[in-house]
């Protein structure tokens, strides 16, 4: 560590959120944000492999995909898209409050994001139970009917794998939101330290982007 | 640190504007899906989704005003995603493109016929 860096780190001795392995809060911020983006690049490829599998089977069985996608409820899908983009708005506003050091605002907007996320998951429960009721879950009880009954199971396998993995990310995100609400309640964030809320926002917006692609690919393209 | 980032705190109105644009695009894509345009339906749906994702990335995720390192990182992620699709589809879409031996069956994708009689499956020239 250079002498200049030593001076810099001694300039931030008081902030309890400063971690000693960094030279200063600025470096801590840029390092953690970079780390979050590297994680998200991994997530892009993680979901990307499923999108790729979806596209390959779609190119093989376009008629079966078309027939099967008509069994999805476009109204519920549109409603969930609005809800999730709304939760991205409240998340962005929570990050803005964190940048301004307003912990009460962070708490309120995170709570709103949490509620909207739960509305999304609630609608997903309704949709999933509907698929079970109508025998649209791949397996021995699958009975969509029509000439593409067998191949349509591939579509519904992709549907459950992709929306299921997306919902799992939402559930993990909801848990993280509770944690950050607790931190904001304890006045953790300030104009000098808001990186964790920014990273929470990046995660939530990423999950929103995945849905932005899932919605047209599963519900709209026949 | 605050002196580096204060200038990037966007006004509330920006976030509401982006939200409004995302809503308009959502209803646009739902409306477009109700009209049968053949293959153009897929292109429109994916193009609208791409625009929506770009809006979220640039403004909600603050990439517009971020460091070159962060922009490069995202670019790398997208490039690898394109590689994955390009290599995967260069395989699947080119199968059978140049013909295949008669005893491979009617399609290059699915081979579920009985194995050929002895002597048939050998290399060309026999």
Image: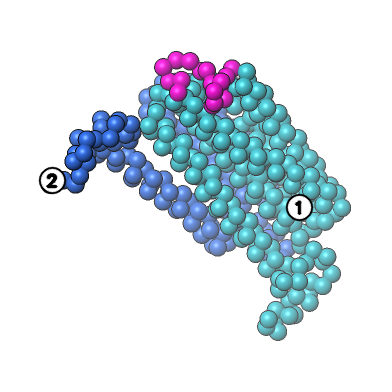
Residue at the limit of the structure toward the left, as seen here: B125
Magenta segment boundaries in residue numbering: A134-150
Q: Main secondary structure of the magenta part?
A: loop
Magenta-span inclusion, residue A142: yes
Residue under the image location 65 percent in, 64 percent down:
A31
Q: Is residue B6 visible from the viewing direction of this image?
A: yes
Q: Residues within 10 Å of mark 2 (few under 14, many from 20)?
A: few
Q: Which mark is residue B72?
A: none
- CA–CA distance in space, label 1 to label 2: 75 Å
Marked residue chain, label 2: B
Q: Residue furthest top?
A: A146
Left or right of B87: which side holds A18?
right
Where does the image place residue B92, in percent across and percent down from the top left? Answer: 34, 40
Q: Quadrant of the N terminus of chain A?
A: bottom right
Q: Colour of chain B?
A: blue
Place of residue A91 in the rendered image (x, y in percent of width and height, measured from the top left): 70, 44
Q: Quick one: B124 or A4, which is closer to the camera?
A: B124
* 1 vs 2, front mark: 2
Do discs 1 and 2 share a chain?
Answer: no
The residue shown at (61%, 31%) is: A81
Direction from residue A1 to residue A73 in the image, left or right: left
Give the cyan chain's letter.
A
- Residue B90's place in the image compared with A157, above or below, is below
- Please indicate, yes or no, whether residue A222 appears anywhere in the rendered image: no
Question: As rendered, which of A137 and B118 lies closer to the eye?
Answer: B118
Element class at badge 2: loop
Residue A148 in the image, given as x and y percentages of width and height: 43, 20
**Label 1 belongs to which residue?**
A98
């Amino acid at each position: 560590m250079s002498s200049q860096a030593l001076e810099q780190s001694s300039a931030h001795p008081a902030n309890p959120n400063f971690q000693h392995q960094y030279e200063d809060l600025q470096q801590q911020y840029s390092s953690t944000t970079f780390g979050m983006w590297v994680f998200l690049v991994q997530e892009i490829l993680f979901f990307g492999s499923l999108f790729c599998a979806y596209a390959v089977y779609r190119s093989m069985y376009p008629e079966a995909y078309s027939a099967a996608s008509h069994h999805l409820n476009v109204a519920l899908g549109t409603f969930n898209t609005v809800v999730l983009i709304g939760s991205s708005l409240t998340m962005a506003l929570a990050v803005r409050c964190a940048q301004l050091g307003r912990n009460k605002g962070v708490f309120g907007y995170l709570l709103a994001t949490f509620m909207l996320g739960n509305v999304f998951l609630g609608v997903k429960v309704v949709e999933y139970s509907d698929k079970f009721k109508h025998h649209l879950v791949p397996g021995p009880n699958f009975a969509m009917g029509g000439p593409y009954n067998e191949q349509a199971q591939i579509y519904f396998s992709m549907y459950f794998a992709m929306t299921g993995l997306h919902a799992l990310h939402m559930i993990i995100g909801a848990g993280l939101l509770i944690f950050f609400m607790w931190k904001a309640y304890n006045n953790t964030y300030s104009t000098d330290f808001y990186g964790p809320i920014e990273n929470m926002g990046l995660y939530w917006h990423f999950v929103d982007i995945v849905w932005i692609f899932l919605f047209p690919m599963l519900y709209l393209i026949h | 640190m605050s002196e580096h980032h204060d200038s990037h705190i966007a006004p509330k109105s920006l976030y509401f504007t982006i939200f409004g644009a995302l809503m308009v695009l959502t209803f646009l894509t739902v409306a477009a899906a109700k009209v049968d345009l053949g293959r153009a339906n897929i292109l429109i749906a994916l193009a609208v989704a791409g625009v929506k994702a770009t809006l979220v990335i640039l403004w909600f995720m603050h990439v517009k005003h971020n460091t070159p390192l962060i922009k490069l990182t995202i670019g790398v992620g997208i490039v690898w995603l394109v590689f994955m699709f390009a290599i995967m589809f260069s395989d699947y879409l080119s199968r059978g493109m140049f013909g295949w031996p008669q005893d491979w069956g009617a399609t290059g994708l699915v081979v579920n016929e009985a194995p050929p009689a002895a002597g048939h499956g050998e290399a060309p020239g026999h």
